[in-house]
């Protein structure tokens, strides 16, 4: 069923909770309904990676397809999951039913439909590894598409869907969780977990770590990591190393070096730095928060200030991980 609601507040529909509204919110419950929509609209999941910086005159589309189908084979479990399912609910359900694999990705906010968009990742694991295909409506060609894992072009916080933000509407995601499961505990915060821990115990540990480190958006509105961790060439890295021998980094397979954006921001002493009602979180420099009174322009100004300071000190241009939206679409920082 398709429902249309007019003049809806976006505050409860995105975790940064800015006080703006949408001219219309359309909700669909069946995949076929998306093919009947015409004109421009923005697809919104749970709004945990989207910040609305003003009132929105385009309709916002929400996908309430909440089915989870599982097929077991000798090798593992094939899951077909509706885009509207809450991501953490899927992680918890699979682990409660002895289907290991997604434990490192526990408690990431958002919907299953958005998970492939930025190839969500945490603690050394990315969702793209488990996705076998994605079903999406192509708004440009007006046809259904089935993307294989390869066609999704997954990369660090990136995919074909993220690069074409107005083109695809994901209605269903297919996953494979192999029975040949091994724990993935090599990432920093997880190294102390018992090597014989069950997948369920690892999920519990991940939840505890995340709760202790990240501000809960329901208590302090935020959109998680605001910037991506930048990748630099060895030459650029050596220049930074000269001035900052303690720079947090790790080498990549392609020879480049990944830097921790939070470390760069922290090094500039910006924790707690405020712009109107928007601020850098006191404990997590990579997270920007809304003190309850932030306006869209505060968030954009703060993000631009951080980006400029990081560029001046480290010669690195930070890229937003969140989708900052105004009425025309994505805001370039
Ligand atoms: C506290 C916190 C912690 C976080 N931690 C992590 C983390 O550890 N790792 C990580 O990767 N991310 C993290 N995030 C970011 C966020 O959880 C993910 O980006 C998540 O996938 C967003 O899901 P959503 O449904 O809220 O997406 P939304 O914000 O609603 O949408 C995000 C983008 O996807 C598009 N989109 C949404 N649904 C669809 C669809 N069905 N079809 C096509 N396009 C769609 C939207 O148009 C938008 O461009 C965190 C966020 C918060 C607030």
Image (cartoon, grey):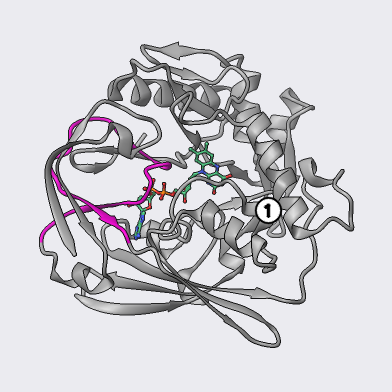
Task: Find residue 327 and report its horizontal and vertical position in percent.
Answer: 18, 39
Numbered range of the magenta stretch: 39-64
**Mark 1 element type:** helix
Task: Find residue 305 and report its horizontal and vertical position in percent.
Answer: 43, 20
Q: Is residue 165 left or right of residue 211?
A: left
Q: Is residue 171 left or right of residue 268?
A: left
**Residue 46 against residue 37 in the figure, above or below:** above
Q: Residue at x 47, y 61 (%)?
A: 116
Give the residue at the far front of this rendering: 97
Q: Which residue is mark 1?
A: 104
The foreground one among 109 and 296 is 109
Classify residue 178 by image quadrant: bottom right
**Residue 81 against residue 323 in the figure, above or below:** below
Q: Residue at x 72, y 59 (%)?
A: 253
Q: Is residue 16 left or right of residue 91?
A: left
Task: Find residue 172 and report its horizontal and vertical position in percent.
Answer: 40, 70
Classify residue 53 by image quadrant: top left
Q: Main secondary structure of the magenta part?
A: loop
Task: Find residue 236 and report its horizontal and vertical position in percent.
Answer: 65, 39
Q: Is residue 157 visible in the rendered structure shown here?
A: no
Q: Is residue 214 visible in the rendered structure shown here?
A: yes
């Amino acid at each position: 069923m398709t429902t249309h609601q007019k003049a809806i507040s976006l505050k409860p529909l995105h975790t940064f909770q800015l006080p703006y509204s949408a001219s219309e919110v359309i909700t669909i419950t069946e995949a076929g309904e998306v093919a009947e929509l015409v004109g421009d609209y923005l697809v919104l999941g749970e709004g945990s990676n989207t910040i609305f910086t003003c009132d929105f005159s385009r309709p916002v589309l929400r996908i309430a397809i909440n089915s989870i189908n599982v097929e077991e084979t000798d090798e593992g479990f094939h899951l077909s999951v509706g885009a509207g399912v809450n991501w953490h609910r899927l992680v918890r359900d699979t682990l409660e039913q002895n289907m290991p694999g997604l434990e490192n990705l526990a408690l990431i906010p958002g919907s299953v439909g958005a998970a492939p968009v930025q190839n969500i990742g945490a603690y050394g694991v990315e969702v793209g590894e488990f996705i076998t295909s994605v079903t999406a409506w192509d708004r440009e060609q007006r046809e259904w598409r089935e993307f294989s894992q390869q066609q999704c072009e997954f990369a660090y916080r990136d995919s074909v869907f993220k690069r074409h933000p107005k083109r695809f509407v994901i209605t269903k995601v297919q996953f494979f969780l192999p029975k040949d499961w091994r724990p993935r505990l090599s990432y920093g915060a997880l190294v102390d977990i018992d090597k014989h821990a069950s997948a369920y115990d690892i999920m519990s540990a991940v939840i505890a770590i995340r709760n202790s480190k990240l501000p809960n958006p329901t208590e302090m509105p935020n959109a998680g990591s605001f910037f991506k961790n930048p990748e630099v060439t060895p030459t650029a890295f050596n220049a930074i190393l000269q001035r900052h021998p303690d720079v947090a980094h790790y080498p990549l397979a392609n020879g480049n070096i990944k830097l921790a954006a939070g470390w760069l921001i922290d090094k500039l002493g910006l924790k707690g730095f405020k712009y109107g009602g928007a601020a850098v979180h006191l404990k997590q420099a990579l997270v920007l928060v809304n003190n309850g009174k932030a306006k869209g322009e505060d968030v954009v100004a703060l993000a631009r200030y951080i980006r400029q300071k990081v560029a001046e000190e480290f010669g690195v241009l930070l890229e937003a991980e969140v989708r900052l939206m105004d009425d025309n679409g994505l805001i370039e920082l």
